[in-house]
C-alpha cells in the first residue's frame, strides 16, 4: 500500500486530510434500456458528447495520473463493475452519475478521464471528464491534496477543443462543443476539506457567509468561462446535506447524527447558487443551466431508504464505514460489507453505484425537461 510519506504533508495530517475530501453532489441519468418512459432506444445519441467538470463525485480517473494521495485505483474500489472488478479511480464500487447519463443518452457506458492514456481524442469526441477528486471552486481547495484546480480543468477543456478541431475539423468540433451536455458537480470540498478543516486559513479571511458568496462568484466565473468557450447545456449540482456524510457523523462525537450546522451552510449556499444561475441565464439567453437539487434528492433517500431497498444510510460499506476512504479503504479492510446494494454510502464520503444510478435518473429527467 503506497504511503503518503514523502509528500509535503505530515503523515498524521495526511491521514486526517485523506478522510476529508471530495464532493457529494450528483448529476446523472439512468434512462437505461430497462426504463419504461425512455426514448433512449433511438439509434443516434441525443447529444454528441457528455463533458464533465468537478470533483470526486464525477472524477472517472484523472487523479490516477497526478501526484496526489487522493486515489481510488485499487480494490475494493470498482469491485462491482460490469464484467468483473475493475478499479478505475472512480470513488465508488461501480459507476458514477456521468457514466449512467452517457449510457442513457446513447453514448458509451463509461465517460473516459482526460488524463487516462488508454483513451484518445477519438473517444473524447463522444465524452470526456476533466474532474479531479478533492478539488473545489476555491483555488486553495485543490492545493490541500495537490489535485487539479478548477481553472486548470478549464485549461484542459481549451486544449481538448484544439485537439478536437484537428481531429474532426472546425465546424464539427464547434457542433460537438455547443450540443454536448455538460455535467458539473463541485463544492463540498470547499467546506469540508478547506474552510472547516482550517488548513488554508480561509476561515480567518472569510465569515462562512462571505465564503459562500465567494464560492458562488467562482461558480459564476466558471460558467461564464465555459459558456464563452461554447457550452450551452449545463447541469450544475447543488450541495448535498454535507453534515450527513458518514465521516461528518463520526466527527459529531458528542451529539451524534448529522452536523446540522453544515447542512444549514449547504442550504444557504444552494439558495445563493440558484439566484446566481437565474441572473446568469437572464444575461445569456443561449445558456441553459439546470440546477440539480442534490440536497433534496439525498435527504429523501436518507429519510425513506426502503424506496431503494437500502438498509444503511449512515455508514459506508467499505471497512468500518465511519472514516475510511481512498487508501484507508483497501483490500485489507476485513469489515467491508458483502452487498453494497444495501448501503447508501460506499466509503465514508461517497455514494454506492446504486445511489449514483438513482440520482442519475432524477437528473436525467430534469435534463429532458429543461435542456434537451
Ligand atoms: C485561481 O488561480 C488562477 C491561476 O493561477 C488565477 O488565474 C485565478 O485568478 C485564481 N482565482 C482567484 C479567485 O484567485
Image: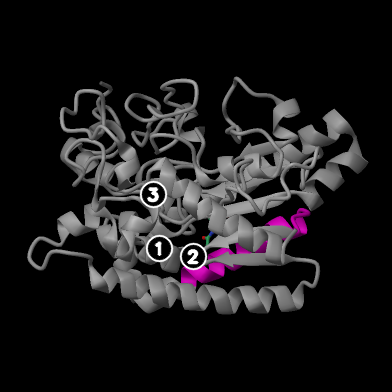
Please, which colouring scheme is shown? one colour
Residue where numbered disc 1 is placed: 240
Give coordinates of residue 242: x percent, y percent.
Answer: 33, 62
Residue visible at 71% across and 73% down in the picture: 281
Is there a contact, CB below 8 Å, between mark 1 and mark 3? no
Residue where numbered disc 3 is placed: 22
Residue visible at 79% across and 35% down in the picture: 164
Residue visible at 40% across and 63% down in the picture: 240
Q: Is residue 200 visible?
A: no
Count of numbered circles in the view: 3
Residue where numbered disc 2 is placed: 238
**For this view, does 232 lie left or right of residue 85?**
right
The picture quadrant for ligand 1 comes to bottom right
Is there a contact, CB below 8 Å, between mark 1 and mark 2? yes
**For this view, does 131 lie left or right of residue 325?**
right
Name which of mark 3 and mark 2 comes first in the sequence.
3
| Element type where label 3 sits in the image | loop
Label 1, label 3: how far apart the Cα atoms are: 12 Å
User: From which residue to which does the magenta span run?
Assistant: 214-232
| Element type where label 2 sits in the image | loop
Q: Is most of the magenta stretch helix, strand or loop?
A: helix
**For this view, does 120 lie left or right of residue 358?**
right
**Is residue 331 on the magenta stretch?**
no
**Is residue 229 on the magenta stretch?**
yes
Residue visible at 33% across and 63% down in the picture: 304
Quadrant where the image shows the C terminus = bottom right
342 shown above or below 25: above
- Nearest the camera: 293 or 214? 293
Amino acid at each position: 500500500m503506497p504511503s503518503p510519506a514523502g509528500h509535503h504533508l505530515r503523515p498524521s495530517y495526511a491521514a486526517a486530510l485523506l478522510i476529508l475530501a471530495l464532493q457529494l453532489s450528483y448529476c446523472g441519468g439512468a434512462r437505461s434500456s430497462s426504463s419504461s418512459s425512455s426514448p433512449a432506444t433511438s439509434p443516434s445519441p441525443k447529444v454528441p458528447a457528455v463533458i464533465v467538470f468537478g470533483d470526486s463525485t464525477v472524477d472517472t480517473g484523472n487523479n490516477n495520473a497526478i501526484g496526489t494521495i487522493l486515489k481510488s485505483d485499487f480494490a475494493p474500489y470498482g469491485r462491482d463493475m460490469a464484467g468483473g472488478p475493475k478499479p478505475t479511480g472512480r470513488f465508488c464500487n461501480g459507476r458514477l452519475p456521468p457514466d449512467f447519463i452517457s449510457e442513457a443518452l446513447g453514448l458509451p457506458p463509461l465517460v473516459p478521464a482526460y488524463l487516462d492514456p488508454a483513451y484518445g481524442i477519438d473517444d473524447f469526441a463522444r465524452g470526456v471528464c476533466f474532474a479531479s477528486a478533492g478539488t473545489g471552486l476555491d483555488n486553495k481547495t485543490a492545493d490541500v491534496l495537490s489535485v487539479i484546480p478548477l481553472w486548470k480543468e478549464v485549461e484542459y477543456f481549451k486544449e481538448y477543443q484544439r485537439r478536437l478541431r484537428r481531429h474532426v475539423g472546425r465546424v464539427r468540433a464547434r457542433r460537438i462543443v455547443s450540443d454536448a451536455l455538460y455535467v458539473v458537480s463541485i463544492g463540498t470540498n470547499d467546506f469540508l476539506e478547506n474552510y472547516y478543516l482550517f488548513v488554508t486559513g480561509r476561515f480567518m479571511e472569510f465569515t462562512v457567509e462571505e465564503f459562500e458568496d465567494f464560492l458562488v462568484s467562482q461558480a459564476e466565473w466558471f460558467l461564464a468561462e465555459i459558456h464563452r468557450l461554447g457550452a450551452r447545456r449545463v447541469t450544475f449540482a447543488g450541495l448535498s446535506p454535507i453534515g450527513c456524510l458518514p465521516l461528518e457523523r463520526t466527527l459529531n462525537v458528542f451529539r451524534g447524527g448529522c452536523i446540522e450546522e453544515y447542512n444549514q451552510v449547504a442550504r444557504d449556499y444552494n439558495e445563493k447558487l440558484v439566484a446566481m444561475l437565474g441572473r446568469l441565464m437572464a444575461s445569456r439567453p443561449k445558456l441553459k443551466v439546470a440546477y440539480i437539487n442534490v440536497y433534496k434528492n439525498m435527504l429523501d433517500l436518507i429519510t425513506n431508504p426502503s424506496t431503494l431497498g437500502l438498509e444503511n444510510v449512515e455508514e459506508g460499506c467499505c471497512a468500518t464505514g465511519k472514516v475510511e476512504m481512498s487508501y484507508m479503504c483497501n483490500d485489507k479492510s476485513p469489515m467491508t460489507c458483502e452487498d453494497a446494494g444495501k448501503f447508501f454510502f460506499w466509503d465514508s464520503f461517497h455514494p454506492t453505484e446504486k445511489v449514483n444510478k438513482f440520482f442519475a435518473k432524477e437528473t436525467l429527467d430534469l435534463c429532458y425537461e429543461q435542456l434537451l
